[in-house]
Amino acid sequence: MDDPTSFGTLYVIATPVGNLEDITFRAVKVLKQVDLIAAEDTRHSKKLLSHYDIKTKLVSCHEHNEVNKIPHFITHLKNGLNIALISDAGTPTISDPGYKLVTAVAGEHIKVIPIPGCSAAIAGLSVSGLPTDSFLFLGFLPKKHQKRHQAIEAVKNQSATLIFYESPKRIKPLSDAMMLVLGDRRACLAREITKLHEEYIRGTLSVIIQQLNQKETIKGECVLFVQGCSPEKPPDKERLAEIILARLSTTDLSTSGLARQISKETHLPKKQIYETILTLQHLKKTSC
């Protein structure tokens, strides 16, 4: 029977999104100490490892071979070897390979430990100028127009700041689709985070679209931040009375049903609306 105490550990290690100096001391130490590094692109990762004189053996683990490699990695881990998982940039599994491996390894009661660090989504959000108390990360949306439109439509009523990843080739169509579905909301486009040509365009979606249209070419991975839906203020007493009186003259709903309907629309308590309906009905009778 397997003894989990003798198993190795899978370390999920965040690496720089651009600037090679954006890596933690702990990450470098672990990368040097593990027995194996599973990298999204070994050719790309060799630059980072060479910079820090890390000589640990590299093997590939990308979206096309991840599933086939899982049994081999689990065998190594059960034999007591330690493995580091890295992606080309940022935190593995965040719109990058590794999710399936982590799930399988954790399912075998093998330790999976994060070595935190860079994430383009969090780095960009921190300087976006948009609310950070609540955010929804959506990664890459579908490439096809209709499916992308449906995906945006599904989150248009979210109050949290929305975060999207996109390639430089598709950032213009994505921004246009956002404008079409969400309207001209406040937004921020982050491009080439931590790199030489780092850029942040802040303003509204229309401002971002205007600046993108002025560029002959767009380079570098992009992160688009869009302000969430601002909830409408509940109607005051006078406006609520107007809404109720208008509905009373056209609806066949019961008092309770009408209260429930208006409560969903205005986000006011059903009890408050129910009592207001009764009051207005009573006033209407006494005035006749």
Image: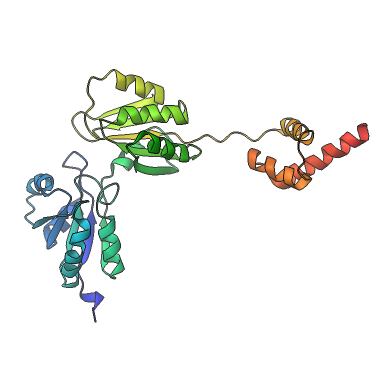
Kindly give the residue lying farthest to the bottom in the view shown. 1
Quadrant (top left, top right, bottom left, bottom right) of the N terminus? bottom left
Q: Is residue 261 visible?
A: yes
Residue 5, above or below 282: below
Q: Is residue 155 visible?
A: no
Where is residue 267? Give x, y as percent. 64, 41
Which of 256 and 222 lies nearest the eye of the viewer? 256
Colour scheme of this structure image?
A: rainbow
Quadrant (top left, top right, bottom left, bottom right) of the C terminus? top right
- Give the residue displayed 38% in from the left and 26% down from the top: 176
Residue 57: image quadrant is: bottom left
Where is residue 254? Give x, y as percent. 78, 45
Residue 29, above or below 22: below
Residue 115, above or below 128: below
Where is residue 90? Give x, y as percent. 24, 45
Residue 221: image quadrant is: top left
Q: Is residue 152 left or right of residue 100?
A: right
Which of 193 and 38 lies nearest the eye of the viewer? 38
- Give the residue displayed 78% in from the left and 36% down from the top: 248
